[in-house]
Image: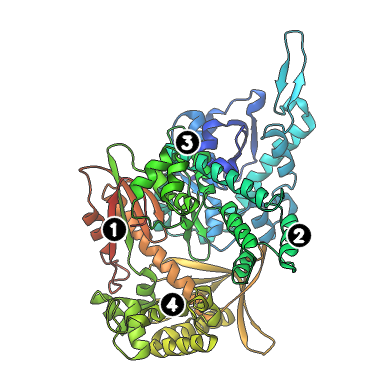
Amino acid sequence: MRTLAIDLETFCELDIKKVGTYKYAENCEILICAYAFDDEPVKVIDIACGEQFPTDFVQALFDADVLKTAYNAPFEMQVLGKYFNKAMDTSQWACTMVLGLSLGLPAGLEQIGRVLGFAENKRKLATGTRLINFFSKPRTAPTLIRGLFGDVIQNRNLPQHNTEKWKQFKEYCRQDVETERAVRDRLALFVPPESERKLWQLDQQINSNGVLIDMTLVDGALAIDSAIREDALLQGKNLTGGRNINSNAQMLDWIEDKEGWRPASLDKESREELKGDTLTSEVQEFLQLKEVLAKTSVKKYQAMKDTACSDGRARGMFQFYGANRTGRWAGRHIQLQNLPQNHLDDLDIARTYVRKADAIALDLFYENPSNVLSQLIRTAFIAAEGCRFIVADFSAIEARVIAWLANEKWRMEVFANGGDIYCASASEMFKVPVEKHGVNKELRAKGKIAELACGYSGGVSALKAFGADKMGLTDSEMESIIKKWRESSPNICKLWRDVENAAKRAIKTAKKILLPNNIGFRLETDFLFIKLPSGREIAYYKPAVVNEDDERECITYEGSIQAAGGWGTNRTWGGKLVENIVQATARDCLAAAMLRIDAAGYKIVMHVHDEIICEMPYGKGSLEEVISIMSKPLNWAKELLLTADGYETEYYKKD
């Protein structure tokens, strides 16, 4: 099969970071196309200056015997599809960025070239951002050009405005193809299995399906939020004698005047700490107003408005392999993975007020209108006319997976009998019966927090991250919970040790190691691969076993550093590796379910964590069938007990 590498440069009035690929593609124009067949020299087509796409390029673009590749291929697929008014066949495309992500490498083309140690002639040119800002975006200050036949507003830079920069821009596009091809060639040995390719194709289909946005609700929410913010600013001005309560410097001075001492900060964490102090009523009122202004979740309404395409559907919300340590999806634009939950009993009534932009009614009937707006965010996703959503999610998927992998039999029996794992965990820990609404029910909360925090060798800090200290538990009580949890789950603790020891042996000896639960370890070139029961592998770049200060051996690898950002050396251990393995396996369960549900004729429009959302006409499909498909045993995990639950609705919500 021949390979065609492609890169495009475009112009658009819209900011792609705000509106996303799909809406951008609806409105952009192609300036330059660089391409190369196989190992042939890269060719550049200057579309902006009147050159046409060559016949061989166009034929290859729609030829099933030619594999098209690009870095972040969905961009090229959507833009070229709009240009030729014909959708690209995803089975004919491959995304080199996803290939890199599947190996734990960075997402950016410039960064991956640097991490892989490419020579300068194979790296992305550093001039790109400057040239893109010059040619691909509107001018920040449009120029008035007076002429014999009238005045013209010049709001963009064209090739003739700076021929030298245009020449550089064409070279930049050409070099991107060189770099993309070099990445593809370097990683060619590690192409994921065909099952992952099919899943990527389904991912593209789901991103293209999109989901309808209730724009009336969105506009109403934005209008009400604006009114709430204006009122809060006015109240703050009156409260503080004309000061701007959005100015931290002014407000720190004001609090010092009122209280006689000065807080170190007014960030979210500091404001929470201040609430626990004895404060004047004025400062307490200021903190309440600050919370109103600091509400960020309503920004999702603006993201919906920005992202929605011409037909009102938001698209491109999922990044395949966005979490490159596990292969889970990452959210884009609206960020479905962190939507606020809804707990209102009268969602329909609240939605009616917001759709009418009735701020007065919302304020009259609800104590906290801003909170209502947050709770309604999910409901802005609506099914098309004549359709409803079928929503189903796995039950306690990570707890089931880790019990299965560790062969913790009492846990598997709990799931087999339909029991509550939090109650069962508390009962096993404290050696007494625990029922959710019955005997020793107060212990369930400790069982729940232990389940959430302890499964991956978490300690006191992990318990605190899940709110153990806010429950009133002391450090010594938390240490006791950890001890009891580990004593009750010896096989899971053994799994941490087995995985860590196997990873160390694989790194040190370069030998293949297989654990009894079908988890395998191998070292190849610069990667440690961990094979999952599904057959998929997760990767760690440049692994090493090093000695820490206390001479204890530690596993390190290179990757993205979440806390600080950028690229660097990460430390990992048995519990963390098990977390990766469990979450990756849970992802594979979701992936298998999605492929089955799609094959059964369901239209998947969203998926969030372990939940799948289908949009189906009334009379077609059923919740019972979707649950049955999700609960069906997997051929690579026949003893893993999967169950799901769900509901049907015309707007998305947390049931």
Give the distance between the C-alpha atoms of the residues marked 4 and 2, in whole angstroms. Answer: 40 Å
Q: CA distance from mark 2 to mark 1?
A: 52 Å
Task: Provide the secondary structure element on which disc 4 rests.
Answer: helix
As rendered, which of 593 and 58 lies closer to the eye? 593
Residue type marked 3: Cys
How far across and down, in percent of the image, does residue 203 sit? 42, 50
User: Is label 3 in a helix, a strand or a loop?
Assistant: loop
Q: Residues within 10 Å of mark 1 (few under 14, many from 20)?
A: many
Pointer 1 or 3: first along the chain: 3
Of the residues under marks 4 and 3, which one precedes in the sequence? 3
Dot placed on the residue nearer the N-terminal end, 4 or 2: 2
Q: Please identify the quadrant where the C terminus is shown.
A: bottom left
User: Could you tell me which residue is drawn at 29 percent across and 68 percent down?
Assistant: 642
Q: Is residue 3 visible?
A: no
> Amino acid under label 2?
Asp
Instruction: Please identify the quarter of the rendering in which residue 399 is found.
Output: bottom left
Give the alpha-carbon distance from disc 1 to disc 3, as whole Å: 29 Å
Q: Amino acid at mark 1?
A: Gly
Q: Which residue is mark 2?
A: 253
Q: Position of residue 381 (x, y in %)?
A: 40, 45
The image's mark for residue 449 is 4
Rendered image quadrant of residue 134 = top right
At a point 77% along the width and 34% down the height, the residue shown is 165
Residue 309's mark?
Answer: 3
Tell me residue 181's x, y (percent). 60, 49
4 vs 3, front mark: 4
Q: Nearer the viewer, mark 2 or mark 1?
A: 2
Residue 179 in percent (x, y) is at 65, 49
Report how far apart the C-alphas of labels 2 and 3 lie in the structure: 46 Å
The answer to whether residue 126 is seen in the rendering is yes
